Amino acid sequence: MRSLLLGIDIGSSSVKTSLLDADSGKALISKAFPEEEMIIDSPEKGWAEQDPDTWWKYVQHSIRYVLSKTSVKKGELKGIGIAYQMHGLVLVDADQNVLRPSIIWCDSRAVSIGEKAFKELGEEYCLKNLLNSPGNFTASKLRWVIENEPALAAKIHKMMLPGDFIAMRLSGEICTSETGLSEGIFWDFQKNGLSDKVLENYQISKSWIPEVLPSYSIQGRVSALASEVTGIEEGVPISYRAGDQPNNAFSLQVLKSGELATTAGTSGTVYGVSDKPLHDPLSRVNTFVHVNHSVQKPSYGVLLCVNGTGILNSWLKKIMGAGHIEYDEMNNLGSSVPIGSEGLTFIPFGNGSERIMQNQHIGAHMLGLDLLKHDKRHMIRSAQEGIVSALTFGFRIMQEMGLDLKTVKAGKANMFLSPVFRKTFVHMNKVVLELYDTDGAQGAARGAGIGSGVFANESEAFAGLELLETIEPNEHFYEQYEGVYSTWKNHLEAIQQMNL
């Protein structure tokens, strides 16, 4: 009998499900729903919301699809892993009904609440115990609900992160993880538990926080109701969960201190693992509990995030092609323009406030436009160079913190399918880039195998991970790409001065 593992990745653009053969370590099938990107509602400027039950609807579609294409027999499915968009807030009542749309990761409404808490809790406590400013994270979003929607807040039974919600829909049980609570800034790293000071300052009831379980563990089993709507056999364990960035690092086997992972989807990230609780004094990059953390063997993930990444590329696709241009064609067009885009520069911060900019809402800007020279090819290349420049800005903050950044791993997907993006990334940051055949859903499936005991250890879980390509920088191009970054940074500083 086969041993199969199911991985679910809840993104803000789509929900992807993969079925992994545990014996070979290879994905049998993967499917994402919907075909077009999910809608993000923005009722007011800087807000970003999604309906959690929309995620659940697409989870059902994707699971039914992969199960139908592989004829899974009774007893073959051994575990389910869940990865999810980080920093979102889901609220339910005592009957597990959703109380309001989820306030998701790129929503900026709680910035001032986090700044106020940083002052009241004190910089020393926040940076030593939380490793971050409370910022615009989940705890601050919950405080916003308490302040602005008190009647709704009175009905709260539990608060959850997006992955906790999907696990609840699958099992009927509500729990969360250490890594999840740390990403919400509920976690005290000194006591290795909930921060009573954050809860007290925000007036958050401790009863609202779900039971805390390790990322690798049995966290509930598929209920009869969920079995009926998904086709999964009743009783299959949910045995892994993590936010998308810790999970992306996990999916690339980035588990030891000094290892790094990167993504370039809707948002762009670099995630480095450290065995020390590092922090940035300005909280421009953030430290969370990694999936393999334990008191005996600490493991922390240092995350830089640029909200305006693939969403900028997607915006260009919409306005340029009106549905008739594909990303491959855009990448080819961008490749036909010289390094530096002949003086055209893109500042990509058009998707809410940016942490690496200390939660400033910089906005997106196209600078140096020459109407007699520049066309859509230049716009495509300059957008990709601008995104990498923003990642480089954060990359250099991580280096200042003491992370040794030499080799970075990524899945060969999203913007890493672009030769321009890949070459700009390796040369601007002077790193080796390793590209793998994996994604977040496959990573979640591997995690489920560890949590359910199918795999004896992490090394066994990654036996089937395939390295597709290694890209090494050429010193000959360092000066050109450093010039692109310097121009970008000068433009950014001028914009910041204008906003003062």
Image: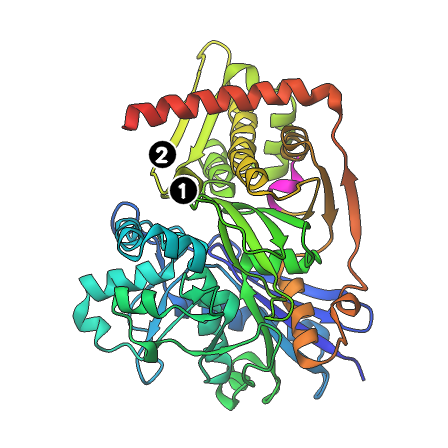
Q: Residues within 10 Å of mark 2 (few under 14, many from 20)?
A: some
Disc number for residue 109:
none
Q: CA distance from mark 1 to mark 2?
A: 8 Å
Q: Which residue is rendered at x = 41% and y = 78% of the image?
A: 210
Q: Is residue 277 visible?
A: yes
Which is more toward the observer, 384 or 305? 305
**Which one is nearer the viewer's eye here, 56 or 393?**
393
Q: Earlier in the sequence, mark 1 or mark 2?
A: 1
Count of picture labels: 2
Q: Is residue 208 left or right of residue 492?
A: left
Residue 340 visible to an observer of this rendering? no
SS for dot 1: loop
Q: Which mark is residue 354?
A: 1
Magenta part, dominant SS: helix
Find the residue positioned furthest to the front: 124
**Magenta span:** 414-418
Q: Position of residue 179 (x, y in %)?
A: 52, 66
